[in-house]
Amino acid sequence: MEETKIPALFTKEGYEIRKAMASTYAGGSVVPEVYQKNPANCFIAVNMAERMGADPMMVMQQMYIVYGRPSWSAQFLIATFNNSGKFSPIRYEFFGNPGSDEYGCRAYATEIATGEKVQSIDVTIGMAKAEGWYDKKGSKWKTMPQLMLQYRSATFLIRTVAPEISMGLQTSEEVIDTINITPDEHGTYQTFEDAAEKVEKETQEAMENVTEPEPAEAPAEEKARPF
């Protein structure tokens, strides 16, 4: 049976088909909250899924919004790479003494078409500390270092040998670990944590400055009414 192809996005028919799909997903309660009642987000997810050759629902379940940025889970990127048919499944090689800064991991795989071994750069605990990932708030580097080494080395491998899989997006683990800075209204820079603390402080100050309204004065006829 011949597979039915959806018309190209930049045609009226193709646009309407994808718009209807997005609207259907947005009406569901099993999609992540960021997509519920949000056809625009669902439309983007449908488009990304089509470009990746993936299921839209899977894309919506595996794309996270961290600090306002869309990002993939490392697990999703690894699974997509392993199922691409272009490479063997990713394997990992650990080196160094656990607990030391030299403890690290490299990810590797074999390109099926050429038989060539491809591997990531070496990722170590020392690198995590130098890059500021290790002590970042919310990071799992201290509690699950082995898993984080695997995730980060696999991400580097995928980004260098199959960048079309990540489509330029970081993983949620990378976004959380990265210390990002943004310019404020004064032209200085602050991290996202600084910005959050600033908002919290200003909100607290505003609440402290709120005064209780004076009770309304009783009407004249009520004042003159005898007890």
Image (tube, grey):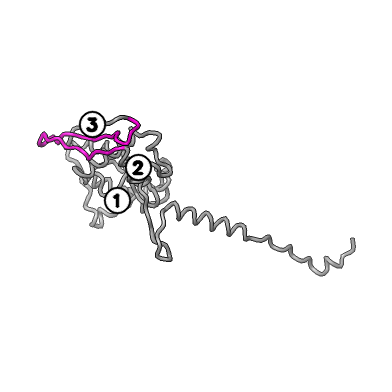
Query: Which residue bears the numbered disc 1?
Result: 18
User: Residue 199: horizontal and vertical position, in percent?
Assistant: 50, 56
Q: Is residue 114 above or below residue 210?
A: above
Dot 3 falls on a residue whose secondary structure is strand
Total marks in image: 3
Which class describes the residues within 10 Å of circle 2: few (<14), some (14-19), or many (20+)? some
The answer to whether residue 193 is seen in the rendering is yes
Query: Which residue bears the numbered disc 2?
Result: 129
Residues in magenta, as a range? 98-124
**Amino acid at circle 3:** Arg
Query: Which residue bears the numbered disc 3?
Result: 91
**Amino acid at circle 2:** Lys
- Can you tell which of label 1 and label 2 is closer to the viewer? 2
| Residue in view at x 25 percent, y 48 percent | 167
Who is closer to the viewer here, 61 or 124? Answer: 124
Q: CA distance from mark 1 to mark 2?
A: 44 Å
